[in-house]
Amino acid sequence: MSSARREIALLANPVAGMGRAAGVADEALARLRAAGIVVHALAGRDADEALDLARAAVADGVDALVVVGGDGIVNLGLQATATTPTPLGIVPAGTGNDVARYVGLTRKDPLAATDRVVRALTTGSRRTFDLARTGGRFYATVLAAGFDALVNERANRMTWPRGQMRYNLATLLELRTFEPRPYVLDLDGRTLTTEAMLVAIGNGPSFGGGLRIAEGALLDDGLLDVVIIKPISKPELVRTYPRLFKGTHTTHPQYERHLVRRVTVAAPGIVGYADGERFGPLPLTIECVPAALEVLA
């Protein structure tokens, strides 16, 4: 396909951002077409069909796959584009938008994000990211494998309230009964047995809408950041939580960090979540896949 023609596929999650993404997708579509870009708007009946459509578009040779929504739709998009030469474009319109933050985008100005896609398609500007892979699935941000994962699991069972408040309530409910879990980790062949409140496997530094749990994680170093928060009291956990937004929790005496290429994490009763998506019960083995993703930037 001629690069001068600039033909892309556009995939949106219409329910992201409590329904905001649908309107953003319409605006982005109009903006892209006004710039002379041929846009194929993809609409799957469910996530599986949307992924099939995205993979087919990539196989057909589109110049980019552009996704509109939050980290969930980004995760779907990178399943189609990872380890291919097709770049991923992001127009943030979700609740979390951590991957968008990695490239300096916010949901406050989705049209500016769309304009960046247009410029990148014109100039060829790209950023190359590592990805993490487990069980054949990729993720870009952080795999939650502790207290934070239990909060996600509870929040997904709740129908009220909507948005971030649901996660805040789930956090309070989970905190009432949570106890540290016994973990066994294989860190590049070295076994570590410990109790922990939280274990997180970071490809990037943040998840959950800006929680910088893996502060210092780099997207292009070929390594995963394994973060462990060892047992602390519940009041101390509540006091420490706000520090996650600034990344200053790294000075806490119960904080531990390991840099690895591959990790297996096992603990009872934990389901892993990454990019806001359910990845499945532990144990999980996660490996870094260097330079796996091209992002329009």
Image (cartoon, rainbow, N blue to C red):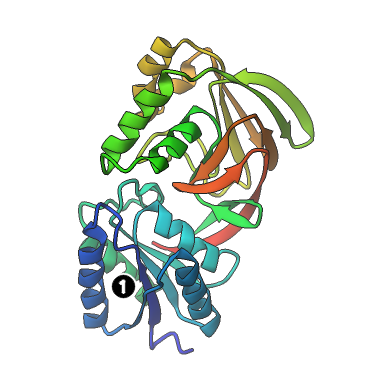
Of residues 14 and 223, the one drawn nearer to the viewer in this rendering: 14
Residue type at mark 1 is Val
Q: Nearer the viewer, residue 40 or 251?
A: 40
Q: Residue at x 58, y 70 (%)?
A: 84
- Rendered image quadrant of residue 283: top right
Q: Viewed as shown, does residue 283 lie left or right of 253?
A: right
Residue 112 on image: x %, y %:
23, 61
> Badge 1 local density, few (<14 within 10 Å), some, or many (20+)?
many
Quarter of the rendering containing residue 85: bottom right
Residue 205 visible, this orientation: yes
- Residue 164 rendering spot, x and y as whole percentages: 29, 39
Residue topped by disc 1 = 118
Name the residue at 42% across, 54% down.
72
Residue 201 at least partly seen: no
Q: Which image quadrant: the C terminus? A: bottom left
**Count of labels shown?**
1
Q: Residue at x 67, y 35 (%)?
A: 265
State the SS at label 1: helix
Check the image and report above or below for 21 versus 104. Answer: below
As drawn, 148 above or below 132: above
- Image coordinates of residue 109 in percent, x first then y, are 20, 56
- Taking the image as shown, residue 2 lies to the left or right of residue 200, namely left
Residue 65 pos. (x, y %): 43, 72
